Image (tube, grey):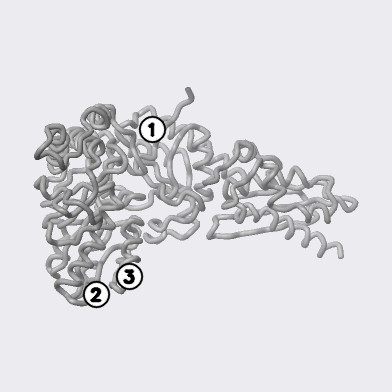
Amino acid sequence: MERIVYLDNAATTPVDAAVLDEMEPFFTERFANPMTYMHSSAGDVAHTAVEEARVRVASLIGSNPEQVVFTSGGTESDNWVLKGTVERTSRERLHKPGHLVTAEFEHHAILHSALALQRQGYEVTFVKVGRSGIVDPDDVRRAMRPTTVLVSIMHANNEIGTIQPIADIARVAHEHGALMHTDAVQTAAHIPLDVNTLEVDFLSLSGHKFNGPKGVGILFVRDHAALYPFIDGGGQEWGLRGSTHNVPGIVGLGKAAQLGKERLPGELERLTTLRNMLFDKLSARIDRIAANGDMKQRVPQNLNIRIEGIDNEPLLVAMNEAGIIAAGGSACNAEETVASHVLTSIGCDLKEAKSSIRLSLGYVTTAKDVDYAADVIPGLVKFLRSMA
Amino acid sequence: MDKYSRATIREFMSPSNIGYIDDPSGTGHITDNADAVELTLSIRVEAGRIADAKYRIAGCTALIATLSVLSKELPGKTIDEALALDMPYLSGLLEGLPESKWRCAGYAVQALHLAIEDYQSKTS
């Protein structure tokens, strides 16, 4: 079989074998609905498994289990927290449309939810981000208004991996009477994460970014009364999120959280070394190459580089032909190649943004993979530059 | 969702006729920063027919593959025959180029038209 070097772990990761093993019985013999646990021993098996998963996820983020609400993933969690808090606080406390503060380089789950709120008459400020790719808490402070309900800043950016000063920003939010949310989809199980250290009221994470299954995530909710439900239905999740529990998915997320927590210290060091090695080798072999965003305050699995004089799209196609899978912008804009909004928000011009690629490592990435990428990519860059 | 045909990938990975023509009969140049495109197509015309076409390109896969098949189609064609080459025809040579890529690949046809205009302005 031809070699595949998968360097798109920020888009998604493979399900760990141990995760799949724990999930499997919940598709078949342990299929019961957890909400039937009071009168059904089969339901109790499923309910116990869901609650065990909740404890494991809580342990990963340093919260109480009852503050972990299962959702279908990061996008739902982001939609829910923005719409649920802004609508509730505006209606019940302010009695007028409230204000949301977020940043220009957020994931589309946040940006498009913010625009949806704007269309409904709520106010939104999109804070600018500089070349470092790190939000300045003072910029957030300047954006605050008496009507600010929520501040939502991602823990690490999904394209450039830069880690944000969430605790400092949360303090600004709280000083102004607003709540604080962070989208931790790129940091959960990758860097140490504690909701109390970060001082956040809400946090989103998604299972498939750390070797769990797709279609399951959580919203950490410090105080259940702070937001309206997003999916109205039965009494699941304290009535905050209707819909029959995705039991296999939740069990898988729990196992991935447990493994992620155990592996974190070792993986943090291993991936940082591999990532830096990859950047050093590429920098030595390709001229006119630079990193996008700060290289130090960055998640270990992310490398985002711009290579002058090439378009990222043919480079990615050529890399794919050589068995290396990576990304241009995020995975969410595949059909028409547009310049990344993240890169343009940190001050790259369109040409720089379109000459950038994201290489993201994961638990499955080996030193051999990194060597192969560092050996092959320079030749492909040379091939493309030779046409220009 | 459309994707690239194998023919497109093959053409892109080993493109024909990269380069400049010395003393060309006409040249078409296109720069578009938003699309990260920098393209120069030059043609040599002999006795009313295109004898040679070469290009230099920084741009997307679709555009590189389209330029490659276009440059192979042009030799032997009259100016009118060359002007009749369009995206549906070139896409067919690539066993179907995704329609979402036609706009960018269309720079190949635009560059040819500019090169022909340049040739005609020199000869008229």
Q: Are marks 2 and 3 on the same chain?
A: yes
The quadrant where residue A139 appears? bottom left
Q: Is residue A264 visible?
A: no
The dot on residue A97 is: 2
Does residue A89 appear left or right of residue B105 in this picture?
left
Badge 3: how crowded within 10 Å, few (<14), some, or many (20+)?
Answer: some
> What percent of the width, then of the height, locates residue B46?
87, 50
Report helix, strand or loop for mark 2: loop
Q: Is residue A34 above or below residue B28?
A: above
Q: Is residue A79 visible?
A: yes
> What percent of the width, then of the height, locates residue A243?
24, 48
Report helix, strand or loop for mark 1: helix
Dots 2, 3 in contact, CB < 8 A: no
Check the image and name the residue furthest to the front.
A39
The dot on residue A370 is: 1
Does residue A379 appear left or right of residue A46 in this picture?
right
Report helix, strand or loop for mark 3: helix
Residue nearest the viewer, comparing B60 with A248: A248
Q: Nearer the viewer, mark 1 or mark 2?
A: 2
Return the disc, 2 or 3, that comes first in the chain's sequence: 2
Structural distance between the alpha carbons of marks 2 and 3? 10 Å
Chain to which mark 1 belongs: A
Chain to which mark 2 belongs: A
Badge 1: how crowded within 10 Å, few (<14), some, or many (20+)?
Answer: many
The quadrant where residue B3 appears? top right
> What percent of the width, then of the height, locates residue A125?
29, 70
Q: Are marks 1 and 2 on the same chain?
A: yes
Residue in view at x 15 percent, y 48 percent: A68
The dot on residue A118 is: 3
Q: Is residue A308 above or below residue A95?
A: above
Residue in view at x 26 percent, y 29 percent: A28
Residue nearest the viewer, comparing A126 with A27: A27
